[in-house]
Amino acid sequence: MIQDEKEKSSRRVVALLGLGVLFVHFAMTSLYTIPSLPAPEGLKKMSRSYIWPMFHQGWQLFAPNVPGYQNDLFFRAYADGKWTEWMDASRMPEVSNHPRIPYITQKVAIRMSNMVKDPERGVYYADDLPQLDKVEITAPYQFGIFYCRQQYKMRFGTFPDSLQLRLDFIVTPNFFTGKKEVEDKSFTFSKTLAH
């Protein structure tokens, strides 16, 4: 009987130690994988030193060239005498949840962002304001207008009178600090007739 109590007691101790180890492991892993969690910097450093030896190659093993930013294409339309709210061109739940729609939209956004960054035909600044007139005469921009015009027709059944596109650059945070090294940028293009 005394031996049964000792066994139960030792099992409880082992179970509590196991739970304690699991708790510490999950806490350290959470602090490492979600750097925005509120915690003292010393604890975050401990979590990095805890995780780093186990996963020292990090994401670079699977994605050695992580893009520095993501670009998203938005549009709004002028129809029936008013402008709509900005609509995400990659989401069309009213029409279809087909997985190719975000893929095609991303291709359009990438072509437009490459044109925005082009040294000769891309964005330039005058009085610290981005000038997009060179981009607006390129094929990627015109295809973006066509694509968003078609999306509007698929959503609402008619073509809009005018369209306006917006291209957002969302910077990828630093893997180790979780902070962005530069600010996100958003380029709003001129209003364009959609006929």
Image (tube, rainbow, N blue to C red):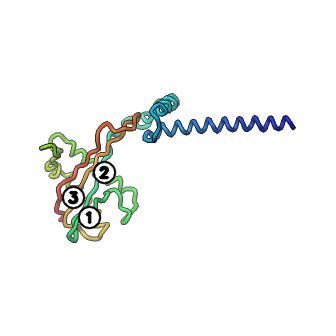
Q: CA distance from mark 2 to mark 3?
A: 14 Å
Question: What residue lies at 59% left-to-right and 39% top-to-bottom?
Answer: 23
Instruction: Return the residue at label 3.
Output: 164
Place of residue 4 in the rendered image (x, y in percent of width and height, measured from the top left): 83, 38
Quadrant showing the N terminus: top right
Snapshot quadrant of residue 24: top right
In front: 33, or 155?
33
Tell me which numbered mark, 1 or 3, is placed earlier along the sequence.
1
Q: Quadrant of the C terminus?
A: bottom left
N-terminal of the pair, mark 2 or mark 3, is 2
Dot 3 alpha-carbon crowd within 10 angstroms: few under 14, some 14 to 19, many 20 or more? many
Real-space Cα separation, disc 2 to disc 1, in angstroms = 18 Å
Callout 3: SS = strand
Q: Nearer the viewer, residue 12 or 101?
A: 12
Residue 129 rendering spot, x and y as whole percentages: 16, 46
Which kind of residue does numbered mark 1 sit on?
Answer: Thr
Image position of 6 (left or right of 74): right
Q: Which residue is mark 2?
A: 72
Given the image, on which type of amino acid does mark 2 rest? Asp
Q: Which residue is mark 1?
A: 84
What's the amino acid at mark 3?
A: Gln
Quick one: SS at disc 1? loop
